[in-house]
Image (tube, helix red, strand yellow):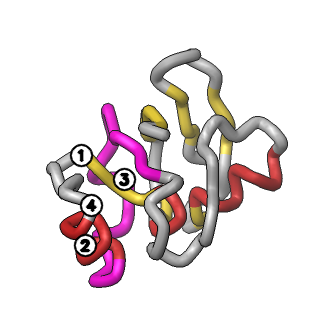
Amino acid sequence: MPKVTFGKTGNSVELSSGSSLIDLEDTGESEVPFGCRSAACGTCLIDVESGINNLAPRTEEEQDLLHDLDMDGDKRRLACQCVIYGDITITPLN
């Protein structure tokens, strides 16, 4: 099972391959705040410190919001839009 490691604390959570990072909420160990859950608010903005290739590509909605927020760097993602296929390390920005 892929592991999500939080860069600031080093804590980690395992999720099934193909899970959305929104599923972190169900573990009770999420360090990512989630708001709208639909790429409309930017609350769940993260930097992917490692494992960016282990996430599904950005959706058009995610890309549009990141651009509108002027946060469309290579390692910036909206956690609500990320589907995980391998180990990643993330740092929440909010």
Q: Secondary structure at mark 3?
A: helix
Q: Is residue 58 above or below residue 9?
A: below
Residue occupied by mark 1: 75
Q: Secondary structure at mark 2?
A: helix
Q: Is residue 49 magenta?
A: yes
Q: What amino acid is found at the position of numbered circle 2 in the picture?
A: Gln
The tag earlier along the polypeptide, 4 or 2, is: 2
Q: Secondary structure at mark 4?
A: loop
How many numbered circles does the render carry? 4
Q: Report whether 14 appears left or right of 4.
A: right
The tag earlier along the polypeptide, 1 or 3, is: 3
The image quadrant of residue 26 is bottom right
Residue 90 screen position, x and y as percent: 44, 36
| Contact check, label 4 and label 2, Cβ < 8 Å | no
Which of label 1 and label 4 is nearer to you? Answer: 4
Name which residue lies at 36% across and 67% down: 56
The tag earlier along the polypeptide, 4 or 3, is: 3
Q: Is residue 34 above or below residue 9?
A: below
Front residue (pair 67, 53): 67
Measure how far apart labels 3 and 2 are at the Cα level.
18 Å
The tag earlier along the polypeptide, 2 or 1, is: 2
Q: What amino acid is found at the position of numbered circle 4 in the picture?
A: Leu
Residue occupied by mark 3: 54
Residue 23 screen position, x and y as percent: 70, 59
Q: What amino acid is found at the position of numbered circle 3 in the picture?
A: Asn
Which of label 4 and label 2 is nearer to you? Answer: 4
Span of residues in magenta: 45-61
- The mark found on residue 63 in the picture is 2
Mark 4 surroundings: few (<14), some (14-19) or many (≥20) residues within 10 A: few
